[in-house]
Image (cartoon, rainbow, N blue to C red):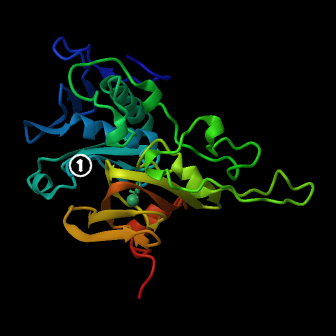
Amino acid sequence: MSTAESIEVQASAPSNQTGYRSFTLGGFSFSRDEYFARVSWMAKGQQMSHSMSADAFLRAMMRDVAWGFFYGWVNFDPVIGTRNHYGTVDMYAGSYYPAYRDSGLDHMENFDSRLMMATFKAILDDWTNEGFDPFAAPEEAGDGWHGKKNGHNRAAIERAREACHRMPGLPGDASLRSDANGFPINRAFADVPQDAPEVYAEPGFEAEVSAFNLFAFLSRSDVTWNPSVTSVCGRSLACPTTEEYILPIKHGNDRVEWFVQLSDQIEWEIEDKHTGSPRAKVLMKAGDVAAMPADIRHQGFARKRSMLLVWENATPNLPELYESGQLKPWPVEF
Ligand code: PHB
Ligand code: FE
């Protein structure tokens, strides 16, 4: 099975028993059955393997693919994950889990991002059945994740991240969602006012001045835990998102990021980035602002769908500045 140019995804024929394909990426192999996704690798001459519930695996894989491996580490769970080097990506099993790493039973390999992306997309495509949307909250995701292979859900997994080309609302930008382009108000945000700001531009500036109701925009998001790049100002990216249930990954930051809790609340579990040992629990309520340090991994829990603004700094050399200690892992010293 091959995709673009010289990128060869290593895939088996569909299994006679379950209908799912197995995949190989370097020394890692990936397989799924009715309930579980399994990643295997060799360490100290033995075959190691690690299983995750297939729904949790697909929710994590969906984010890693949609975010282009994101900033830093995307831990699918405490054992397996990826680290972005922006051009190449590490895949690891146990390397940030002391019990594996300290006994030499972990495995890490670096891949060209294009090969890893093509492989992950092929896995996501093959293992996501009709009737399961790995981007959606459990109430809306459908129950089709378990059982033998049953069709596809390409409309869900090929949704692109919403990126603005200009400020939302200005001509040439397609990202401002409204009734007109088919996104209904989510059940959890039925009480969010939908009124729009009134803008009176000087004649001649109509195409350059805009304002929109961010709460109304977010109330129509059909995905969860998927920050959209909604404004770009230099290297500063405002990435609001709607959150319900559990962030499907434990994100290991390679830079400081700021959270502004816009509505409702999220509970964050903060762990050491390298060992996973607990560092803090943070309950963010509407109006709270937090800086998430560059040396942590974190996972959010939201009982009710909530709105969160993730403020990212896309300065290219930040990971090196933090790794080398030139920048402290926190933004402010009190
Ligand atoms: C994060 O890891 O910082 C993160 C990722 C996705 C979200 C929110 C926060 O939806
Ligand atoms: Fe993060």
Q: Is residue 328 left or right of residue 245?
A: right
Other-residue count near label 1 (Cα within 10 Å), few / some / many at <14 / 14–19 / ≥20: some
Res 229 seen here = no
The correct choice, above or below, for 76 with respect to 36 in the image is below
Q: Residue at x 10, y 55 (%)?
A: 99
Inspect the image, locate mark 1, and give the three-letter code of the amino acid beneath it: Asp
Q: Is residue 173 left or right of residue 29?
A: right
Residue labelled 1 has its Cβ within 8 Å of some atom of ligand 1: no
Give percent across and percent down for residue 39.
20, 35
Between 179 and 43, which is closer to the camera in this rendering? 179
Q: Is residue 279 left or right of residue 82?
A: left
Between 239 and 65, which is closer to the camera in this rendering? 239
Label 1: element kind: loop
Q: Quadrant of residue 13?
A: top left
Q: Residue at x 45, y 81 (%)?
A: 332
Q: Residue at x 28, y 32 (%)?
A: 26
Give percent across and percent down for residue 265.
38, 64
Give percent across and percent down for residue 97.
17, 55
Q: Quadrant of residue 203?
A: bottom right
Quadrant for the C terminus in the image: bottom left
State how many labels appear: 1
Res 22 seen here = yes
Between 333 and 127, which is closer to the camera in this rendering? 127
In the picture as drawn, the residue positioned furthest to the top comes out as: 16
Q: Which residue is mark 1?
A: 77
The correct choice, above or below, for 135 with respect to 194 in the image is above
In the picture as drawn, the residue positioned furthest to the right comes out as: 203
Give percent across and percent down for residue 240.
51, 56
Quadrant for the N terminus in the image: top left
In the picture as drawn, the residue positioned furthest to the front comes out as: 191
Give the quarter the ligand 2 occupies: bottom left
